[in-house]
Image (spheres, rainbow, N blue to C red):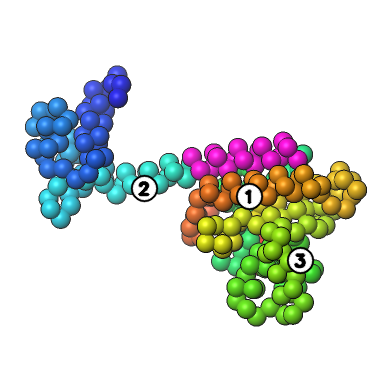
Amino acid sequence: MLPSSVGVLDKISAILVVLEKGPACLKAVVSESGLKRPTVRRLVLAMQELGLVQVDEQGQYVIGARLIRLATAAHYAIADCDLLRELSALRATTGASVRLHQRYGDQRICVAEALRLKSATGDGKSARAIANADPVSRVFVAWRRLSRGHAPRDDALACSRIRHHGWVQGADEGCLVLAVAVCGRDGNLAAVLSLSSPSRQTRREASYSREVIKSAMEAATRISSRLPVKEATALADGRDHDPQVRSTSV
């Protein structure tokens, strides 16, 4: 590890390198870091106050809860960047607007290109009848209703077809929309990837081409392994609200 121009940060980093390997007593931290005992003791106490280091039940020093939270935040940031690149690449390939949608409680949240949660205010639409719902809602309903096992006969057949193919397309507000299921390893629906284009821009003005559908399906597979799990409570933080992005109850 290359040293920085700030000595105290280098010393703190040396201590964290030791604790990164696992719990360590004061003697071990001194020995492995190469720092003097008084220096280690002083810095470790300060790091404890900041939540960077804590003491376990055996009296050994371990990585603190604050560092764990920072590591989690870094993981999400990296995952978000990967998702953004994936969505941007799909948009460049297909020429369509690309969005990612997730469910938080009874709300369908549109996770836009920046991959941040948007406003949770509803637009008054209902997804009760799958035949009349927009494509994104139809995918959500397909997984939800068959899982609960109480869909009407016609809806059950439509849901089965959607789950079998993994996608559905249709018109919504003057656009042709392709909605693709993004499933986790357990087969449960984690999100819905959507492509939307003005009807006049799509081939035959009726459906997306096989090439576009294939590209979207492949992107959904890659996204499924990169999608970070967001807590539903994040909606209550009031962060990144954008009233222009709709949310639909499903």
Q: Earlier in the sequence, mark 1 or mark 3?
A: 3
Q: What element carries label 3?
A: loop
**Residue 172 position by quadrant:** bottom right
Mark 3: which amino acid?
Answer: Ala
Residue at the disc numbered 3: 133
Q: Which of marks 3 and 2 is nearer the N terminus?
A: 2
> Which stretch appears magenta?
78-94
Between residues 65 and 119, which one lies in front from this camera angle?
Answer: 65
Structural distance between the alpha carbons of marks 1 and 2: 28 Å
**Residue 171 position by quadrant:** bottom right
Mark 1: which amino acid?
Answer: Ala
Locate residue 60, reporting x and y percent: 14, 47
The residue lying at 88 percent from left, 53 percent from top is 206
Between residues 243 and 107, which one lies in front from this camera angle?
Answer: 107
Membership of 64 in magenta stretch = no
Q: Does the residue at mark 1 contact the one at mark 3 (Cβ under 8 Å)?
A: no
Residue at the disc numbered 2: 69
The residue lying at 70 percent from left, 51 percent from top is 194
Q: Which of marks 1 and 2 is nearer the N terminus?
A: 2
* Badge number at residue 220: 1
Quadrant in the picture for the N terminus = top left
